[in-house]
């Protein structure tokens, strides 16, 4: 990580470790999923890292992402993953639900805002002059402490219906208590047949009984009436 941060600094590129790694670190869990966001050209940084340390690079120009395979490089070690993902900070715009996004380069704050839940919006700056600084624009740390799964905006499930499945997975993994409430928001936001299509297409089964979806919708609407910030 220090090698990447120093190389990014020499390229005048702010770099952050984001998402699941920071979340798991703060939950005192083993953190191995290293995603790094670069304010600037992540592919350029990846090429510079390969030139300096070796390894192999693959990239996706449309999304500004690069994957650095560190095997055979100077920094390869048993404690490192096989590859490190380098991602250009970006903003995404969806022309219609479930469409591939239109991508524009951006800064770290809007990049974090495009993520699924607030607990995955935490970032740690790696550049030497501000190393270790925690960025928490969307109260992700507080939601972690409270065991809360919360989306960032009301169209979150319209943009990506598979976030429904992730909400359940996080609830089961971390024993958070409000996945049912988040699901209620999803059913209220999406047409029920759309949700059913998503679930059938993934082969994922919730084991919900008859009438479960209407109950969730009713629960969600009641919840909004009582507390507009409960989910969104």
Image (spheres, rainbow, N blue to C red):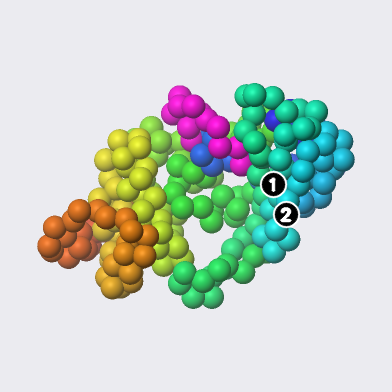
Residue at 66% x, 39% y is: 83
Q: Quadrant of the N terminus?
A: top right
Q: How would you rate the neighbour count of disc 2 (Cα within 10 Å): few for under 14, some for 14-19, many for 20 or more?
A: some
Q: Quadrant of the C terminus?
A: bottom left
Q: Are marks 2 and 1 in contact (CB under 8 Å)?
A: yes
The answer to whether any part of residue 164 appears in the image is yes
> Residue 97 location, x and y as percent?
45, 72
Between 36 and 224, which is closer to the camera in this rendering?
36
User: In this picture, is 191 found above or below 174?
Assistant: below
Q: In this view, which residue lies farthest toward the front?
A: 72
Q: Is residue 26 magenta?
A: yes
Boundaries of the magenta span: 23-35
* Position of residue 118 in the picture relative to residue 171 (left or right): right
The answer to whether any part of residue 106 appears in the image is no
Q: Which mark is residue 36?
A: none
> Residue 21 location, x and y as percent?
54, 35
Residue at 45% x, 27% y is: 29
User: In this picture, is 166 found above or below 6?
Assistant: below
> Residue 26 location, x and y as percent?
48, 29
| Residue assigned mark 2 | 59
Residue at 32% x, 55% y is: 204
> Residue 176 location, x and y as percent?
31, 38
Main SS class of the magenta portion in the image: loop
Between 69 and 127, which is closer to the camera in this rendering?
69
Q: Quadrant of residue 16?
A: top right
**Disc 2 to disc 1, how far (Cα)?**
6 Å
Q: How would you rate the neighbour count of disc 1 (Cα within 10 Å): few for under 14, some for 14-19, many for 20 or more?
A: many
* Position of residue 200 in the picture relative to residue 101 (left or right): left
| Residue assigned mark 1 | 67
Between 105 and 62, which is closer to the camera in this rendering?
62
Look at the numbered disc 1 and give the secondary structure of its residue: strand
């Amino acid at each position: 990580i220090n090698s990447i941060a120093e190389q990014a600094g020499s390229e005048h590129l702010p770099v952050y470790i984001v998402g699941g790694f920071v979340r798991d670190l703060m939950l005192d869990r083993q953190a191995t999923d290293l995603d790094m966001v670069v304010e600037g050209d992540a592919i350029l940084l990846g090429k510079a890292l390969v030139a300096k340390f070796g390894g192999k690079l693959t990239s996706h120009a449309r999304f500004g992402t690069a994957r650095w395979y560190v095997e055979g490089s100077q920094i390869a070690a048993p404690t490192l993953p096989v590859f490190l993902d380098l991602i250009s900070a970006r903003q995404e715009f969806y022309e219609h639900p479930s469409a591939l996004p239109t991508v524009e380069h951006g800064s770290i704050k809007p990049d974090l805002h495009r993520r699924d839940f607030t607990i995955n919006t935490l970032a740690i700056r790696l550049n030497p002059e501000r190393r270790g600084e925690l960025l928490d624009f969307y109260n992700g740390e507080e939601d972690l402490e409270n065991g809360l799964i919360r989306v960032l905006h009301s169209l979150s499930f319209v943009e990506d219906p598979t976030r429904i499945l992730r909400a359940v997975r996080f609830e089961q993994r971390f024993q958070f208590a409000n996945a049912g409430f988040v699901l209620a928001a999803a059913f209220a936001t999406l047409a029920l047949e759309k949700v059913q299509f998503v679930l059938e297409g993934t082969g994922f089964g919730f084991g919900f009984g008859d009438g479960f979806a209407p109950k969730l919708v009713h629960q969600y609407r009641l919840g909004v009436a009582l507390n507009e910030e409960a989910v969104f």
